[in-house]
Image (spheres, grey):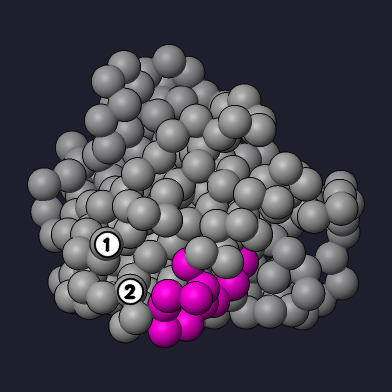
Amino acid sequence: MNNQLLNAATEAARAAGKIQRENFGSALHVNELHKHDIKLELDVRCQQAITDLLLARYPDHKILGEEGNAGGEGAVEWIVDPIDGTVNYFYGIPHFCVSIAARDRVTHEPLVGVIFDPMQDELWTVIKGARPLLNGRPVTVSGRSAMSDAVVTVGFSKSKEALDLGFERYKRIAYDVRKTRMLGSAALAMAYIACGRLDAYVEEQISLWDIAAGHMLVEAAGGKVEMRPSTMKPGTMFICAWNGTLPIQPYL
């Protein structure tokens, strides 16, 4: 069953990625423009493509997505971010991805996860109980254990309160690590941790669809993820993901 779910997620992610490649650099219709965020018509179109493919195979499954929910009350929930890194996409920065995860609707046990970077043609996949893969090859987190050796990516959220907290945490981290990076995609940050490119990622306020597939990838690759409810916006979370060996706790 999980292999079938993974095949469906992979097909859907590649379909959405194809739409993104074909439209990258073209004139884009903006549905909503916020101070720290952008919503594109293309987000909606990509989620619809994903929804259509998944529900064609599993009509009773539930879709929880950044652009809305669909489907029924079956045994599986799909958690979808059609374009994670929309601001990057809008500004022509080729760092964004499709993120799709499936979990048990009742227990919330993760079943499969897929992250697809259509510009680099990189596909991360993970299935419950198995090692994560990047383009079919097993990956693992880095073995770096000293903060002075680490490269850490920090996400800055969409509210003033979250930004202020993020700045304070960033100052504590930045003094101690080799380098910090701000990349603009939570899902790719976690995929990069899973394959050892980055060592940690932290953000004050994040949504489930941004990190559901990445959470599964990081833990399957040997890393750790800590989440707790955000104090700023109901339904969002603070997250820190790392390789499992860095002494990250003092920074949390």
Q: Which amino acid type is shown beneath numbered disc 1? A: Pro
Q: Is 127 left, or right, of 23 in this rendering?
A: left
In the image, which disc is placed on residue 210?
Answer: none
**Residue matched to label 1:** 247
Task: Please give the name of the residue rendered at 27% of the width and 62% of the height, measured from the top-left corner.
Answer: 247
Mark-to-mark CA distance, 2 and 1: 7 Å
Residue 108 % position (x, y):
31, 26
Magenta residues, as a range?
173-184
Q: Is 110 left, or right, of 182 in this rendering?
A: left
The N terminus, quarter of image: top left
Query: Which image quadrant for residue 25?
Result: bottom right
The secondary element bearing badge 1 is classed as loop
The secondary element bearing badge 2 is classed as helix
Structural crowding at the residue carrying mark 1, measured as other residues with C-alpha within 10 Å and reported as few (<14), some (14–19) or many (≥20): few
Q: Of residues 161 and 128, which is closer to you in this image?
A: 161
In the image, which disc is placed on residue 147?
Answer: 2
Q: Of residues 89 and 241, which is closer to you in this image?
A: 241
Q: Is 155 left, or right, of 159 in this rendering?
A: left
Task: Please give the name of the residue rendered at 78% of the width and 47% of the height, measured from the top-left corner.
Answer: 160
Residue 252 % position (x, y):
42, 49
Residue 63 visible: no
